[in-house]
Image (cartoon, grey):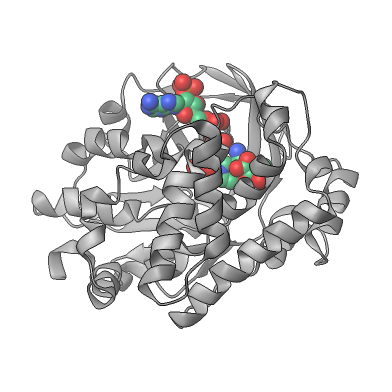
Amino acid sequence: MRVAVLGGGAIGLGMAAFLAENGHRPVVWSRSGAPAVLEVAGALTGHVPLEVAPGPAAAVTQAEAVVLALPANHHRAVLDAVAPHLGAGQAVILSGHLSFGALYLARLLAARGVMLPIIALGTTVVTGRRTGPGAVRIGSIRAQVDLATLPVAQAEAGLALCRALCGDRFRLRDGLLAIALSNVNPQNHMGIALCNLTRMERSEDWRQNDNITDAVGRLLEALDAERLAIAGALGLGVRTLRQHFALSFHVPEAPLGEMARAMAARGDNPQAPATLDTRYVLEDVPFGLMPTARLGRLVGRPAPLHEAGIALLSALYGRDLAAANDLLPGIGFDDLSLPRLQALCRDGWCAA
Ligand SMILES: NC(=O)C1=CN([C@@H]2O[C@H](COP(=O)(O)OP(=O)(O)OC[C@H]3O[C@@H](n4cnc5c(N)ncnc54)[C@H](OP(=O)(O)O)[C@@H]3O)[C@@H](O)[C@H]2O)C=CC1
Ligand SMILES: CC(C)(CO)C(=O)C(=O)O
């Protein structure tokens, strides 16, 4: 299948390599360009020729599937650029989905009278780091990835497409709200960034799993308990953070600090951010923690640690980080009642 990959960071390049490995034809667009031949190391190895598109619109033209593989703080601009060029016979995969980006895209398409399957993944299929302009190291290929579609009626078609692209590793969840509560990067990264902020600020060379100590692990699990309580109030099944780590990084379930040590011991210990200008904060606070905290308020399960994380990191950065979210205003989130949000997450924009 011809697959447009929007983004040439670790996940864009890692997905391109994985898709090529599975016999597909990735066409990659990245703001700063993408390599004609990609050097791949880690969980996959080799040299992968890539088709490179000059812009996002050119990438999606004639693609059967489109994978958006960028941090959520760049989603709006890229979705605005591609939405006018999407049409029947295509499907869009948001990898991973944050901040109701699927609803944002559905609204753009509905304005043109177009309705496509939009597939929201709870996380990425591969993990990794870009190790040079033309090189990626794939850390892990996940055993399971949660999936939902917008509209829900496209769930089986969306599942079949993802399986055809990436193999039998997807599990259908109870719709977009469940996926909105399944991406655990925001809680995970907030705890890691907050507890290691000076390492980031001083540009230290540090490894992530060495620094998810037992204490940091306890914070991550306390944040997770808030997320699970919100999902529970909505009657939605989502994985625990321990289950997510076990399925993503192939280590047995245990307290988080212990799991991080087990991951490091098997050689999975990714480079952690060496700057304050990192998606661990600039993506995950406005586009992850903030919407979850809002959902918590909406369902009567306030999330004090989420709220505290947003406030503390905003104080550390000297600005209101939550205000950077440009997706929620695009769907009028503040004016949505819970039943209306649930209807939109089920049927999409046209039918709601
Ligand atoms: N890496 C991982 O293991 C995991 C990542 N994720 C998620 O996957 C998504 C992608 O992450 P990842 O690939 O690692 O991120 P990276 O930091 O590796 O790459 C981010 C990319 O964003 C691009 N970019 C920066 N500014 C803009 C802009 N204004 N417009 C368009 N593109 C821009 C850069 O493109 P360029 O280089 O061309 O300038 C860069 O390649 C994120 O949502 C992340 O949270 C989730 C789980 C694991
Ligand atoms: C490193 C990893 C896999 C775990 O935090 C990740 O999720 C990321 O880089 O976004």
Residue 178 location, quadrant: bottom left
Asked if residue 250 is positioned above or below residue 314 in the image, the reply reads: below
Front position in the image: 289 or 236: 289
Q: Position of residue 309 (x, y in %)?
A: 56, 50
Residue occupying the point 54% across, 41% down? 313
Residue 298 location, quadrant: bottom left
Residue occupying the point 35% across, 56% down? 100
Q: Position of residue 171 (x, y in %)?
A: 54, 68
Asked if residue 109 is positioned above or below residue 36 in the image, the reply reads: below
Q: Quadrant of the N terminus?
A: top left
Front position in the image: 256 or 137: 256
Residue 176 location, quadrant: bottom left
Viewer can see residue 29: no
Residue occupying the point 10% across, 51% down? 111
Q: Quadrant of the C terminus?
A: bottom left
Q: Position of residue 172 (x, y in %)?
A: 48, 71
